[in-house]
Amino acid sequence: MLQFRKKRDAVTDWLPLSPAERSVAIEVLVHGPLSRTELARRLSLSQGSLTRLTKPLIESGLLVEAPWAGAPGEARQGRPSQPLDVVAESRSFLGFKITDEMVYGVVTSLRSDIVARLDRPLTGHDPEYVADLLACMTAELTGRHPAVAGIGIGVGGFVREHAVVGESPYLRWREVPLAELVGERTGLPVVVENDVAALVEAETWFGAGRGLDRFVVLTIGAGIGYGLVLGGRRVPYAEEDRGFGLHWIIDPLGPLTPQGERGSAVSLLTIPSIRYQVRAATGRDASYEEILAGAAAGEPMAARVIGEAGRALGTLLAQIANFAMPQKILLAGEGVGLMEVAGDTVRETVRAHRHPLAAPIGLETKVSDFHDWARGAAVLAIQVLVLGGAGG
Amino acid sequence: MLQFRKKRDAVTDWLPLSPAERSVAIEVLVHGPLSRTELARRLSLSQGSLTRLTKPLIESGLLVEAPWAGAPGEARQGRPSQPLDVVAESRSFLGFKITDEMVYGVVTSLRSDIVARLDRPLTGHDPEYVADLLACMTAELTGRHPAVAGIGIGVGGFVREHAVVGESPYLRWREVPLAELVGERTGLPVVVENDVAALVEAETWFGAGRGLDRFVVLTIGAGIGYGLVLGGRRVPYAEEDRGFGLHWIIDPLGPLTPQGERGSAVSLLTIPSIRYQVRAATGRDASYEEILAGAAAGEPMAARVIGEAGRALGTLLAQIANFAMPQKILLAGEGVGLMEVAGDTVRETVRAHRHPLAAPIGLETKVSDFHDWARGAAVLAIQVLVLGGAGG
DNA sequence: GGGGGTTACTTTTGTCGCGGAAGAATCTCG
DNA sequence: CGAGATTCTTCCGCGACAAAAGTAACCCCC
């Protein structure tokens, strides 16, 4: 095993952490204030070890002994426990989500709570220009929130080594070293990741997937996104966000749309495909929300398209549950409104495609806007920069 | 962490092993003869630690310094490495697979090589009678192979805690403490497990899934079996072998058979369903092999049913690959002959349901008879009894 | 308001497992 | 037969941990 520093150099220096220290830090960061005894129990360590491990973390300023805001109603015996908490405000992180025509930015605390937002239109796709814009937004945000420790950027497309955008069809980029470009303009450490991957990491650490071993995120919006987390780690895959779901054929006799193959998840479920189907059938262009409302009100065409989408989603969820066996599936993205209108259809279809004895799917729905995607990028920065990349 | 014995009590006593010792033992057992230096590299330990760890394992008789049967052609410089190997013959294990009307038994070495076989018809389903039969077979096998260290039993059905058959529709058992029944008759430690689970474990340790992180076993035979291995560990699930695949609807317009729902994996792929479909269409009863041969020869009905089965299998494999993302899928069971006749159809269908950029599926086919199922049970006994249950 | 009980945390001590370095063993090649 | 190379062993020291003993903080109760 590696050797670690014999003595921490300075108060401001967090890293590096030994594996045991890191596990303590992550446990407190993710699962809120915890006493040393509770931590000892969770991490299967002795109390003495926890005194040893927490001491340098408190000295370095990462943890504090929380001022015990316990419920005064319950009076327990014995010495009160001393909960430890991360100093969430001691460092801030920036998260950016780059879309086709907008850049969404957030400032988060160490806990990934959003404390500020800033959006800017994106008028061009030149990498230098985008980097300049990000640097400009960073300057504006750091003005208001000084202690920024790092930047996370989420991009739709294929990203290598947390740094280089290998290919992004939306931005028409190939091999753009975005982390380097932004890093040299801001002087801050930068982490770049695929946007779906970042959202999945964020939900795994701080959201619906917290503490789970097997976890799936399915996003519905302009496209389909899929993230698989096993053993607390996200499984990377080659076709990541390069047209995911185009070839998930759900119904060979299903609709054909400009976006996807006949009867594919893309053709049945994405917002553009649903709008296209309704437009093709009725001749009128309706927004996604209007179509959902129409389906709820019983308009035949909208109801037919939305019903078909609901059955497709149910089939998809059942297949995921049957084969990947996650403990929970999180449904996210701009298109989850489908669940409110067609939720019964979805659940019924899932039931039909599952074994009666199978464990019920832990299904959670989360309405997410673009700031949630930006927050995901910030979480990735937290993971990589503060805690040395390891998951837990 | 737990304390382990200060000194090994006797030469015959293998257990317990410390975690580090166990990892060494498993690495040698699974990956063949390995030198200490190679082991140090693989396990990220120092050479000194390997001397320390291997010494008690050699003293206890689990490992030996192999008599270096190296290829004499390659002459290398320096002190020759001293490969370590498990003494595969030092202990034998019995594996039994109980089917509706037969009990298949094997004797295996520590490496899970089959060294003897013994089958007996099962004329009744009474637990006491089955236990008596197993004890009788054990006595006959131990007569020829003395150093039997344990018994593994594979049963179609739901098994709890490696000991109790919770429910087995084939045998019409509920809550039968089979491990106890056989243990008190033979005096040997007994491990009971679901047959598919046992086969999956065997392939994970010694077969196609060796050393993989994500691995799937799909069996086709009288039914459908599915096993998912993540992080080297099998994921248990509730509906295990209680009618698996009945509700995997692959083609809603597909055939309906007595065994499964319309268009389900069971109706499309299992041997009884395929025979039923051909019989229903032609009026003649044909064996599975005859149907396969007929399809290969171009008989229309057989070709149609087998083609449909091939497309169903391709769809299934693509769904598994899309959602569970295993590094390899092993196709096993009595029905894998399908791949020989309809392999091209299967591969083509997989391609159509996968993203062009997705990593190709590592697909392996293994013709397995009932003795392979019995061997799987023996592997489970090896895992639990010799190495303390931990996977690697 | 001082025990006694209870729980949380800290200090101390001993042990164990590991890495690293030096040395022994065993081969090839010149 | 010696030099070089490679593997394995021995030995030492460090650091992480558990266990146990000690300290602190709070309760209740008399």
Image (cartoon, coloured by chain):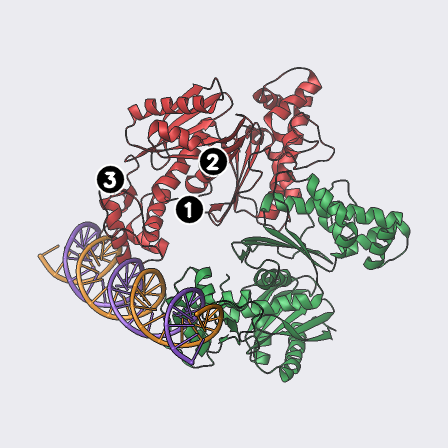
Chain colours: A green, B red, C purple, D orange
Classify residue B172 as left or right of residue A310. Answer: left
Residue A249 can be seen, yes or no:
no
Query: Could you say where residue A101 lies in the image, as x and y percent from the top left?
Result: 74, 69
The label nearer to you, 3 versus 1, is 3
- For the residues labelled 3 and 1, the Cα–Cα distance comes to 23 Å
Q: Which of marks 2 and 3 is nearer the N terminus?
A: 3
Disc 3 secondary structure class: loop
Based on the displayed image, in which of its 4 quarters is residue B225 positioned? top right
Based on the displayed image, in which of its 4 quarters is residue D6 positioned? bottom left
Query: Could you say where residue B33 lies in the image, as x and y percent from the top left?
Result: 31, 44
Q: Give residue B391's mark.
A: 1
Q: Which residue is drawn at 43% across and 47% down?
A: B211
Q: Earlier in the sequence, mark 3 or mark 1?
A: 3
Disc 1 secondary structure class: loop
The label nearer to you, 2 versus 3, is 3
Q: Give residue A67's mark.
A: none
Q: In which quarter of the image is the N terminus of chain B?
A: bottom left
Residue B104 can be seen, yes or no:
yes
From what the image shows, is residue B125 above or below residue A158?
above
Disc 2 secondary structure class: helix
Looking at numbered disc 2 in the image, what kind of residue is underneath it?
Answer: Leu
Q: Earlier in the sequence, mark 2 or mark 1?
A: 2
Residue under label 2: B199
